[in-house]
Amino acid sequence: MAISALQFERSKYAPKLPKALQGPVKVVVGKETESVADQEEIQKLFPNTYGMPLITFEEGADTGSLPVMNVGVILSGGQAPGGHNVISGIYDGLKKLNPENKLYGFLGGPGGLVDHEYMELTDEIIDEYRNTGGFDIIGSGRTKLEEEAQFDKGVEICKELNINALVVIGGDDSNTNACVLAEYYLQKETGIQVIGCPKTIDGDLKNEMIETSFGFDTAIKVYSELIGNIMRDANSAKKYWHFIKLMGRSASHIALECALQTRPNVTLISEEVAEKEQTLAEIVDYIANVIARRAEDDHNFGVILVPEGLIEFIPEMKTLITELNDLLAEGQQSANEFKALVTDAEKRTYVIGKLSETSSKVFASLPEGIAKQLTLDRDPHGNVQVSKIETEKLLIEMVDVRLAEMTEEGTYKGSFSAQNHFFGYEGRCAAPSNFDADYCYSLGATASVLIGNGKTGYMSSVRNTTKPADKWIAGGVPITMMMNMERRHGHMKPVIQKALVELDAAPFLKLAENREQWAVETSYVYPGPIQYFGPTEVCDATTKTLELEQGK
Amino acid sequence: MAISALQFERSKYAPKLPKALQGPVKVVVGKETESVADQEEIQKLFPNTYGMPLITFEEGADTGSLPVMNVGVILSGGQAPGGHNVISGIYDGLKKLNPENKLYGFLGGPGGLVDHEYMELTDEIIDEYRNTGGFDIIGSGRTKLEEEAQFDKGVEICKELNINALVVIGGDDSNTNACVLAEYYLQKETGIQVIGCPKTIDGDLKNEMIETSFGFDTAIKVYSELIGNIMRDANSAKKYWHFIKLMGRSASHIALECALQTRPNVTLISEEVAEKEQTLAEIVDYIANVIARRAEDDHNFGVILVPEGLIEFIPEMKTLITELNDLLAEGQQSANEFKALVTDAEKRTYVIGKLSETSSKVFASLPEGIAKQLTLDRDPHGNVQVSKIETEKLLIEMVDVRLAEMTEEGTYKGSFSAQNHFFGYEGRCAAPSNFDADYCYSLGATASVLIGNGKTGYMSSVRNTTKPADKWIAGGVPITMMMNMERRHGHMKPVIQKALVELDAAPFLKLAENREQWAVETSYVYPGPIQYFGPTEVCDATTKTLELEQGK
């Protein structure tokens, strides 16, 4: 396999570990925990794994090798930078506990456990993947481990391979399922432990004990590099407004962090839109006004950040989509009437006539292409495919219309020309930044110590992350501690609370405090690409979100 | 102005210079030159600047300060990484010749010379922009310097500011115009010299004396970083085909270089499409066949590179577009008939009926959206806006249709799901790689020595660029040497020959030799982001194109 010069040099990097994990580890048992909400229900659902104590690691005395253990690891869900380092952290951690320990990787995600697809990870394989991006070492997948039949298939293969513990590397849902699995395996006395590791580049798996989920640091640095480059282009050419959509469907952490890194003219935050119940027209107005104010200074250029999930956070759009889903559902008379119409104009008029007053207004305001997409491109269940809506193009078209009105009114004198971008896949598999390389390796090492100490239903936790790595605090958090009950597909389920952007927390307040200035002035900052070898100020900086959350 | 940690550290970088430019310079006059073709016509058009000798610099003895000179610099056309370093190279070079020398920047491109918009560049300003991307120090613009009235306005401001020389930093057209300006200023005995510097990220200003144009190195490294990240994602998720369009309308150097860096499954090269007179259907077939072959190994994923200008290189598409332009031209009866039709289907049928047999077949084969775009979205002259055609989406739709046919035929058993990307603005203003930082600074320093020695009508030339910088050979090339006569807008004009991808040269041959293997196997290489501080193998590597062209 040919590798690049950078990959070759980077493979030599030795990730930094918390002091407690550098030698023999002493396990300190903290106070017992309870779930963040719905304590009674959660306890009832997790009788064996509820209320366990927090665990922290300290430097300890050498206690010799532990008995031989085999461990299985699973990558679950979308890629995030650093997954390979979690695995190498587990691997090295296990070998440190006992050189005879083995690590198996289940292939293609949780499905590999169920279908008994696996490989043993060896020195040679692990070395090829140290400090690299991607999940390609064993592959990932989106199979959800939710059924007892799946759990039982898991037991089969674990027995066959003498596996004592599984590590599930995944997001909030995968870790919820890991905890269900841990509970089930305890209850069935299978002797198989389950440990979770917190991954999501969206950054929405985050709480008091999990300061950040891995991959977020690297991904936002890739996106910020690109945003900065585009800003410099905008400020050089002085003729385009760039609308940049950023990954993040359920939370806007990425858009917020990229804004703090680069200082764009406009940053939309889905959580704020929902909280203030903003309409699409209000959002368009806000953007158009910023454009008009910059045009007064002859600055007919700018950069606007749009979170991927925006549409679903606009209350009136949510309502519209629900109504459309009902109106055009397979088998409805209205759906048949709609289909019988020939021209786009007829179809549009028909839909407008059938919607509620509010929704028909919203629908009528949408650009033709988007309106058509909402009524035609539907998933197999007949539902609108919200994720296929090109939000950045929708905004460009609507802003263009609004600016034309403002030109008529005399409130805008400028020229508007726009470019659209979407950054998602560009960052999910980047080689991890020093932070993510260290953090992931530490999470993996933590998992191996938790396993060595017989823990199950825990998530690896590495805290104090704005300090140098040797001051990081490693340990385990009972997964039940992060849970509450939420309605999912019509049923109440125990789930890990999703961390949305908090409008009263420091990162958002920093944006709110500065955005007026950033809107009108050209305050761009150009972060440049991730550096692996240079001065520590450049290579080891954490995210602004972490710094602000920790009061720095 | 807030700057990033990287920008702060990077501002300290001292670009490397060829040995000959590190101290006092000796000017060595080489043999006289002639244009690459059409010698007689070019000589007639450039009586004063034709046939001048090549100039090379060697280390010389100190000859003391030269008389005070003022110089003006102009950025012309699209941004390319390193423009600021050309300017700092000129600035430092001038100050070395005589600390009293002044450098003026004309603002917003060549228009600044005509409109007398300028600023004096000082230590403080220059220091703020060293080793940064963008053209924002003085701005750029697309005004073409072609009229004598413009040239005369230039003389006015040069006289006012005592400017002895202008440096035009631009692409092939801007350098052609720089040479016309040099000729005119000589003929009018204005005493104003004109020097060009070779910029284009597309890489199409290139010849025996200009090994590479600046910015290409950095831009392809940014694009290759992103392509590599997407490849790693493709190879991890194993479910998407990524169609990536890359900047480069008139030449496919960027797509070719990125392919050599990253080894995608399919790389389209416009020059090959034109040479082999490939049809759109053949291109779609080629892609679909690669997809089908990978599907046999259950590899339902891959990466495809598409050059931005592809459509205009497909002979049948060129013909179709010409016919459409004629058919729907403002005022034509057919245009009015077309407009009177109501439904898309009617319009489509009408157009198909009016085109030549070949073109109507091509038009009928196009996806609905693209066909509509071709007939509706037209520029103010009624012409099809080729640059707005989303080639990557066109290919995805057509490949999808072809794969459905192949499924029917039993020649394809796989699942096809695609993502599209376009990378252009992401790379144009990146902070220059070490290579571009050094190369640009050297080009600027070279320009100042050419000026100090009274040269005009020359382009800065820095060669031997696959060697370490101190071994680079700097000097000047008469711009007329690179010219030939070409038809432009109906007239024969002297222009610098555009360097397209040569199908018999080493870089393309390398692709041709390997693409069969890269198509079927997963041979991806992940270059990662540009590094500024690490090992020289990582930080100072030149492009594969340069290495192969120079037989490395």
Image (cartoon, coloured by chain):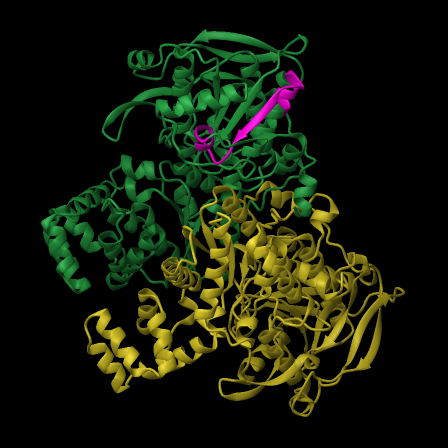
Chain colours: A yellow, B green
Q: Residue at x 45, y 14 (%)?
A: B190
Q: Is residue A2 magenta?
A: no
- Residue B118 screen position, x and y as percent: 53, 31
User: What segment carries the magenta color?
Assistant: B92-115
Q: Is residue A141 above or below residue A303?
A: below
Residue B49 seen: no
Residue at the image position 47 percent from the left and 53 percent from the top: A242
Q: Position of residue A42 (x, y in %)?
A: 66, 88
Q: Position of residue A1 (x, y in %)?
A: 54, 46
User: Looking at the picture, how far across and down is residue A530, in whole percent?
Assistant: 63, 49
Locate the C terminus of chain A and report the quarter of the image it occupies: bottom right
Q: Nearer the viewer, residue A396 or A135?
A: A396
**Residue in front for this viewpoint, B138 or B509:** B138
Report whether residue A7 is seen: yes
Residue found farthest to the right: A61
Residue B4, above or below B211: below
Q: Nearer the viewer, residue A490 or A519?
A: A519
Q: Is residue B97 magenta?
A: yes
Q: What residue appears at the point 79 percent right and 56 percent down from the top-left corner? A: A468
The part of the image, by quadrant, that contains residue A38 is bottom right
